[in-house]
Image: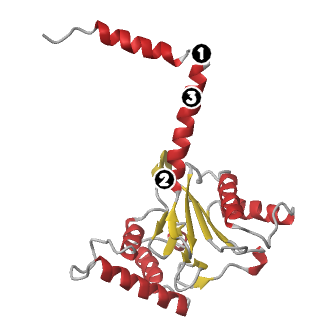
Amino acid sequence: MTTIIGLKTNYEANSIIIVSDRQKCRYEGDKLIAKEPVKKIYSGKSWSMADDGGDDDEVIDFYHTLQGRSAKQDKQFDQVDLQERTKSMIEKVIKESFFAEVRDLNTKLMKNGADLDQTHSFIFATTHPELGLWLIDPFGNLHKPHEQNHFQYIAIGSGKEEAEKYIDSLINGEKVDREKITTRRGIKIAKETIAEAEKDAFTGLGYDLVILNQQKWVKEWGKKIRNDMKKAEEMSLESIANEYEPPEIEEKEELLQKEQEPRAA
């Protein structure tokens, strides 16, 4: 399973923030044999989606179709045509509050032997035709976040209970102003919530972050975060090593080794 958080800011420049963990569990029978990092949030020019049902091939094909890059698409359509078809599809979905392709996807999975617990719900966000955030149930119906959640947020997946408990503690404990959720504050809340949801055994291995904003559209930030964290760790380890050996010792050893290497004739 997984944990995915979607929240909409409500102060100054509105944004939608989606954060997911990256853990996939592989089993042989009932035995857990590996935990692997996987991508769980997929995005296009004006939309982003994430689901709580694992990485079935059918679901990945569904995302790729929305992105206009599925090999199964008709050959006569080029990338621009495919993206226009997706744009029209999403406009219809929002107008009707119904995503027929999600219903069809889950229907197909159930025909192939999945039960209702193995179907997929989605967090769905757009910048066009509006900046909006929805939950899509397995039958394709769109649901706005409940007003009782204080500000607009949705949590899905196996870590949902831990995530909702943490956000409610922030609001009820007045640790955040529910009427002033900025993009900066929203990012912090979403990241902390994912960390808290790691109490769930099926949530972990870092996180991905996507931000939708009508000024900056849709941007994925997970890869940058991981690269920055890796660089920071390398710098920290270098600093620790310098506490024991000045870097020039290593440089001198490398220079001496080169001088001792036999020269080519």
Please tell me whether mark 1 sits on a helix, a strand or a loop.
Answer: loop
Q: Is residue 26 above or below residue 48?
A: above
Distance CA(mark 3)–CA(mark 2): 21 Å
For the residue pair 72 and 175, the one nearer the viewer reads as 175
Distance CA(mark 3)–CA(mark 1): 11 Å
Instruction: Identify the image quadrant of the C terminus.
Output: top left
Q: Is residue 179 above or below residue 219?
A: below
Residue 123 visible within the image = no
Instruction: Identify the image quadrant of the N terminus.
Output: bottom right
**The quarter of the displayed image where residue 168 is located:** bottom right
Q: Relative to 264, is 152 on the left or the right? A: right
The residue wearing badge 1 is: 244
> As shown in the figure, which amino acid type bears the numbered disc 1?
Tyr
**Counting residues from the N terminus, which is met first, the one under dot 3 or under dot 2?**
2
Task: Please name which of the two marks, 2 or 1, marks the residue nearer to the observer.
Answer: 1
Q: Residue at position x 46%, y 67% from top?
A: 42
**Counting residues from the N terminus, which is met first, the one under dot 2 or under dot 1?**
2
Residue 261 image point, x, y percent: 26, 9
Would you call the spot at circle 1 few (<14 residues within 10 Å), some (14-19), or many (20 or more)?
A: few
Would you call the spot at circle 2 few (<14 residues within 10 Å), some (14-19), or many (20 or more)?
A: few
Q: Residue at position x 68%, y 78% from top?
A: 145
Q: Residue at position x 65%, y 56% from top?
A: 191
> As shown in the figure, which amino acid type bears the numbered disc 3?
Leu
Residue 121 visible within the image = yes
The residue wearing badge 3 is: 237
Distance CA(mark 2)–CA(mark 1): 33 Å
Residue 57 image point, x, y percent: 37, 65
The residue wearing badge 2 is: 223
